[in-house]
Amino acid sequence: MDTERSSIQKAQSAPLRRVSGKAWKEPKKATRRSMLTKSLKRTYEQRMREVQDQKAAKQLEKELKDEKQAQRQERIAKIVERRKRREEAEQLATQQEKMSQRKRMRVKRKELKARAHAKH
């Protein structure tokens, strides 16, 4: 009698359909909300609250990412500006050097002309 009861209980507790022997395969769940188990059912408000939390987290993440990107762009802009100023200063220095060379050449020519006129 005990063996009959235990076999009946085992039969009742056994799943109704064939179960795959694969360890990685999870049992299927109901696709319709009305068929879900109580533990999986959540109210609409709970689901919406979770969605809002996820949206808030994404928004915060986006803001942090944008802020970081803005700081990076600012740093890059400063570097570019510094290089530009340095280049301009170098160009100005070379230009002034050329101008002073030209001026020296002009003065030299004038002196040579003056000497030539003085000899005659």
Image (spheres, helix red, strand yellow):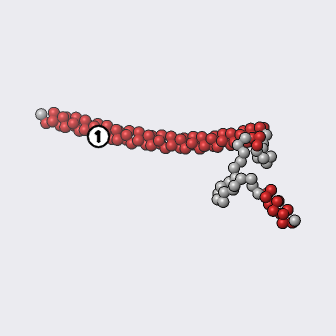
Viewer-side residue, 74 vs 113:
74
In the figure, 40 relative to 120: above or below? below
Q: Residue at x 65, y 55 (%)?
A: 25
Work out which residue is located at the far right of the displayed protein and give it. Answer: 1
Q: Residue at x 28, y 37 (%)?
A: 102
34 sits left or right of 108 in the view: right
Label 1 residue SS: helix
| Label 1 crowd (10 A; few <14 / some 14-19 / many >=20) | few
Residue 78 visible to the viewer = no
Residue 59 visible to the viewer = yes
Residue 48: image quadrant is top right
Q: Residue at x 29, y 36 (%)?
A: 103
Residue position for label 1: 101
Quadrant location, the N terminus: bottom right
Give the number of callouts: 1
- Whole-percent x, y for residue 75 in the image: 53, 43
76 sits left or right of 95 in the view: right
- Whole-percent x, y for residue 79 in the image: 49, 44
- Whole-percent x, y for residue 53 in the image: 72, 41
Quadrant location, the C terminus: top left
Q: Residue at x 71, y 48 (%)?
A: 29
Work out which residue is located at the far left of the displayed protein and give it. Answer: 120
Viewer-side residue, 88 vs 69:
69
- Whole-percent x, y for residue 39 in the image: 79, 48
Viewer-side residue, 56 vs 47:
47
Residue 56: image quadrant is top right
Mark 1 residue type? Gln
